Amino acid sequence: MVNKWFTTMECDGIKVDTMLDKTTLVEGDTVSGHVYVIEETDEEKIDYISLRVLKKSANGIQTIGKYGVELVGNIHTKEMEIVSFEIIPDERWACVENEEIIFQTVVVLLDGTEIKDEGMITYTFLEE
């Protein structure tokens, strides 16, 4: 069973791909993956990228994990920049009925424009 998550966002000559290594996690696992950034021109247009883990419940949405991506000092290839990330879960990730965990990629451009994409992940605590 493939449980990777992959998303592509494109805007104004920029392409941002986010890939999670796994979307089904158990206690002790981390959320990890890579962000691939391709800018079609030499002009930098991205201010920053935020990776967020959100918990959605009847009471609203709560941020339970976050990783900020700065496009400085990362792996560069001729065509793209590659950013590795890892987010470590904590006790807030425990879900009860009607709660869900969402992984969200937010790209903020220098002009203030935000583009977002998201997908569901599952996190299961081991029983004692």
Image (cartoon, rainbow, N blue to C red):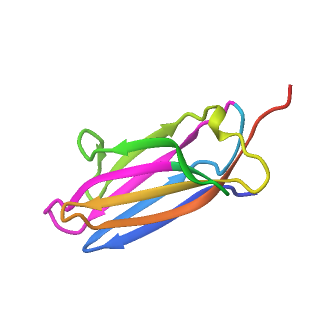
Is residue 57 in view from this perspective?
Answer: no
The answer to which image quadrant residue 95 occupies is top right
Q: Quadrant of the N terminus?
A: bottom right
Q: Residue furthest front?
A: 59
Q: Is residue 41 left or right of residue 19?
A: left
What residue is rendered at 44% in x and 50% in y?
51
Q: Is residue 113 visible?
A: yes
Q: Position of residue 12 (x, y in %)?
A: 25, 74
Q: Residue at x 30, y 62 (%)?
A: 38
* Residue 55: image location, x then y, percent: 61, 50
Our reading of the magenta stretch's main secondary structure is strand
Task: Judge whether residue 71 is colored magenta.
Answer: no
Count of numbered labels shown in the rendering: 0
**Along the horizontal axis of the image, is 110 left or right of 53?**
left
Q: Residue 126 lies in what quarter of the image? A: top right
Residue at the image point whose x is 63% and y is 54% from the top: 59
Given residues 107 and 39, the one toward you in this image is 107
Residue stretch in magenta: 28-52
Q: Residue at x 17, y 67 (%)?
A: 41
Horizontal placement of 119 versus 100: left or right? left
Report whether 84 appears left or right of 62: left
128 to 12, vertically: above or below: above
Q: Residue furthest right?
A: 128
Give coordinates of residue 70: x percent, y percent. 28, 44
